[in-house]
Image (cartoon, rainbow, N blue to C red):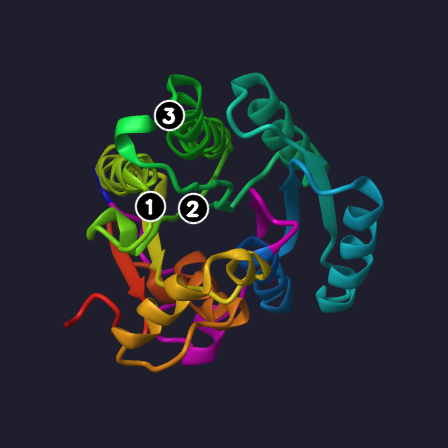
Amino acid sequence: MVLASHPDAASPVLAHFSLKGKNAIVTGGSKGIGLEVARGLLEAGASVAITYASTPLDQVEALIDGLAVSAGPRATVKAYHCVAEDRDSVFTAVNSAAENFGGRLDIVVVNAGYGEDCPAEDYPEDKFRKIFDVNVSGAFWTAQRAAQIMKGTPDFHSGSIIFTCSISATLVNIPQHQSAYNASKAAVLQLSRSLAVEWVDFARVNCISPGVIATKMINKLPLEWREHWLSRLPGGRFCEPAELKGAYVFLASDASSYMTGGNMVIDGGFTLP
């Protein structure tokens, strides 16, 4: 097994971050972190497909129009409906994206997922199973199909698979009750490390573990939770979703050509004290 070398390590450093000519898919790309990741990849020159599940079609179409502004003159942006816990739906979406890009995928951001607050002793079986179906099984199906396409592409240099993980993979965040979510994200972290070794010949596999991100969802959470998180956050504020896109571009690009099996923690120091 040999990790692919940088195609031109002596080139000027900013060229290492270029994604021109690359094709990418971002699951869960219609809102929050996924939307900003898609924007960042487009801004770096990639053509990008996003998947969505519950976002209304008219909103998705408006998002695509907005993202098109971020695309370079030769880049494109597409959207595909995908139910993350349904293997057939995942395979169909990834296949459709690859076909639209001429059969080639270079970058896969496995971002679709969800969490909920529920005391462990009261967790219903169906909800516990669903969180693993979405966060773990869905993540694996996405990576698996993408890897099959990468491995089967003639003269393929090296792909990049990036999992959106969480600081909850390595700590127990309080005061919320989210044992199933924490366990699912820990599984994603170990999955990515395992795949990094198994797929080293044709793809780099890494994780990004965000801390508390200021998505629209966070304003729906109890105020006492947000106050507690801020009280233990050395950075003193929550992260804007757009602040993460540079890290994803780094992992997607040749700038990270020798990085695989890594977990980038971006949390404003939350996990340090």
Which callout, 3 or 1, points to the residue nearer the camera? 3
Q: Position of residue 223 (x, y in %)?
A: 45, 65
Name which residue type carries label 1: Val
Could you tell which of marks 1 and 2 lies nearer the N-terminus? 2
- Which residue occupies 26% across, 37% down? 183
The numbered mark at residue 157 is 2
Q: Residue at x 51, y 30 (%)?
A: 149
Q: Disc 1 marks which residue?
A: 205
Q: Is residue 19 or residue 71 the one in the foreground?
A: 71
Nearest to the eye among marks 2 and 3: give it: 3
The residue at which mark 3 appears reads as: 128
Task: Check the image and report above or below for 36 versus 28.
Answer: below
The span shown in magenta is 3-31
Mark-to-mark CA distance, 1 and 2: 14 Å
Q: Is 87 in front, or is 221?
A: 221
Q: Secondary structure at mark 3?
A: helix
